[in-house]
Amino acid sequence: MHRKSSLNFKQTDIKENQRRIAKSLLDDSKIRKHFKASLKLPTAYKYIIEEDKFFWIRKELPSGNASVLIYEVPLNTIQKDTNTVANIIQMRDSIGQKHIEGTLPNTYMITQATYSPYFFNIMMDGKKTYETKGTWELKNDYMAGPFINYAIRDEKNKRYLVIEGFCYNPSMAKRDIMHELESILKSVKIL
């Protein structure tokens, strides 16, 4: 009973966060055009990188930032009946190396290897989805923080639509930021 009530509380909390976010939304027409999906983001977020199959959207914080990544990969990127978590980590790390660079040379975002990420099979927007929660770090640097990743199986468009939230907020609480990111990510609709 305790687990069920805490899940209901969390779902209610996410809905309330989404209601607040909906009061002032960032224009997601670029996301609709490039990814055939919609996402409800607050206007505090700004587009940082817009490439054909990769977007980075970020909100600056007094002591760091919160980010949303949107990208798509072919269905065979995450193989069934193999080590799904390893495939997701490999996918994240290749995206991080290509797009999320640090300020120092040869620094880029990877999944922290020290702790295995939490992994769940869930449904989002009526589609099978892999939910992965863990810690990211900058390779060859000292930055790190939490992430939440959703790989949504989109058979119609022969892809996984991947949406991820992560934050960097050193020496500060990250729970509320991650909760906001989860609320944003769970607003996704594939068109």
Image (cartoon, rainbow, N blue to C red):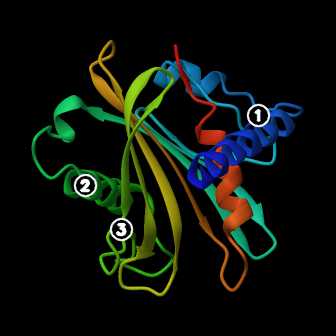
Comparing labels 1 and 3, the label whose residue is closer to the camera: 3
Query: In terms of sequence position, does the residue under pointer 1 or pointer 3 come before the other?
Result: 1
Disc 2 from disc 1: Cα separation:
32 Å
What amino acid is found at the position of numbered circle 3 in the picture?
Thr
Name the residue furthest right: 23
What residue is disc 2 on? 85
Q: Are marks 2 and 1 in contact (CB under 8 Å)?
A: no
Amino acid type for the residue under numbered disc 2: Val
- Residue 85 location (% of width, % of height): 25, 55
**Do callouts 2 and 3 mark residues in contact (Cβ within 8 Å)?**
no
Q: Percent from the top left, x then y, of residue 157?
A: 33, 16
Q: Which residue is mark 1?
A: 26
> Which residue is more in the foreground, 125 or 87?
125
* Disc 1 secondary structure class: loop
Q: Nearer the viewer, residue 42 or 172?
A: 172
N-terminal label among 2 and 1? 1
- Disc 3 residue crowd, few under 14, some 14–19, many 20+, Cα 10 Å: many
**Tag 3 residue:** 111
Residue 7 placement (x, y as % from top left): 61, 46
Residue name at image x 71 percent, y 61 percent: 177
